[in-house]
Image (cartoon, helix red, strand yellow):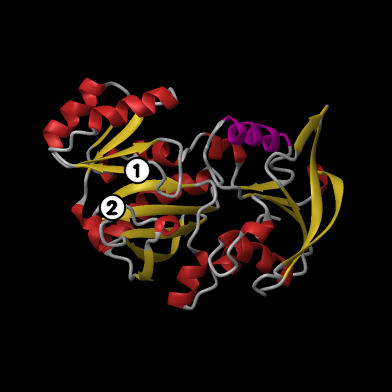
Amino acid sequence: MVFSVAFQMDHIGSVDIDADSTFVLALEAQSRGHTLYHYLPDALTLNGEQVIAAAQRLKLRREAGNHYMLGALEAVDLASVDVVHMRQDPPFDMSYITATYLLERVHPNTLVVNDPAHVRNAPEKLFMIRYPELLPPTLISRYPDEINAFRAEHKDIVVKPLFSNGGFGVFHIGPEDENLNALIEMHSAINREPLMVQKYLPEVREGDRRIILIDGVAAGAINRIPQPGEARSNMHVGGRPVKWEMTARDWEICEAIGPDLRERGLILVGIDVIGDYLTEINVTSPTGLQEIGRFDGVNLEAQIWDAIESRF
């Protein structure tokens, strides 16, 4: 089977070809003979019943500094393509949500990965509250009294914005830190969302695991070690990936959430685990495919494409 495949993503010129998961997903599709299109997240138009993308034909090569070729801009009716990958980076803002509504107009006749309605209903830090037994102590609130009471109970805490990514805006606040109220005030001045506050897990110094699930089944994992003096282990902020053998607790977490992911059409998901606790479920544009491939000698992008093609 030969498919036409559209990638909704940040500009292909900006990707790191040795780390970016979208790049290898597209490269695998190209190796299977599929026709590729590339368009930016703001390039969608709804005209009557048609969802049109201002897209360009895409060809890829693994050659640093010369890794892509784009054709002429054309109006592509997304109902005419077989697969759309929604792979732009968060933040998960109203623009992102709008894109899910537009892509929902063509799914499932055009297979959107991941299912846009369930992406909309599963923002990373909120979807996981379905599984309180898997989480560290967690508070979601914008009220200073509630947040201060949570810190008084748990001493060390981590404060996160709900809809950012890559470790942006994540703070480790100790029991004597005088900046908590100022942080709450600054956040409240910028947006109206509550904050997520969790008990600090000292196990993060030993790493924050990224586990990739394909169709709800764990397919591989890496551990990400934070830099000295850094509480965040995201690779965006310098976390160092190392090989990881999944533990019994890792498997237990994946088996608890996997059926829900599969039922919701969330084909490619990346979860984060610190110590014994689930800390995020990433359904928008999870990363880690290349790092896992190098450590474990597996081709997760091929497994993902096998899962996609099995739906046709």
- What residue is drawn where x is 29% and y is 61%? 207
Secondary structure, mark 1, is: loop
The answer to whether residue 8 is left or right of residue 263 is: right
Vertical placement of residue 300 versus 46, above or below: below
The quadrant the N terminus occupies is bottom right
- Contact, mark 2 vs mark 1 (Cβ under 8 Å): yes
Is residue 46 or residue 264 the one in the foreground? Answer: 46
Q: Mark 1: which amino acid? A: Val
* Coordinates of residue 67 in the picture (x, y in percent): 70, 69
Q: Which residue is mark 2?
A: 231
Mark linked to residue 246: none
Mark linked to residue 170: 1
Q: Residues within 10 Å of mark 1 (few under 14, many from 20)?
A: some
Secondary structure, magenta segment, majority class = helix
Q: Residues within 10 Å of mark 2 (few under 14, many from 20)?
A: many
Vertical placement of residue 117 versus 194, above or below: below
> What segment is highlighted magenta in the picture?
94-105
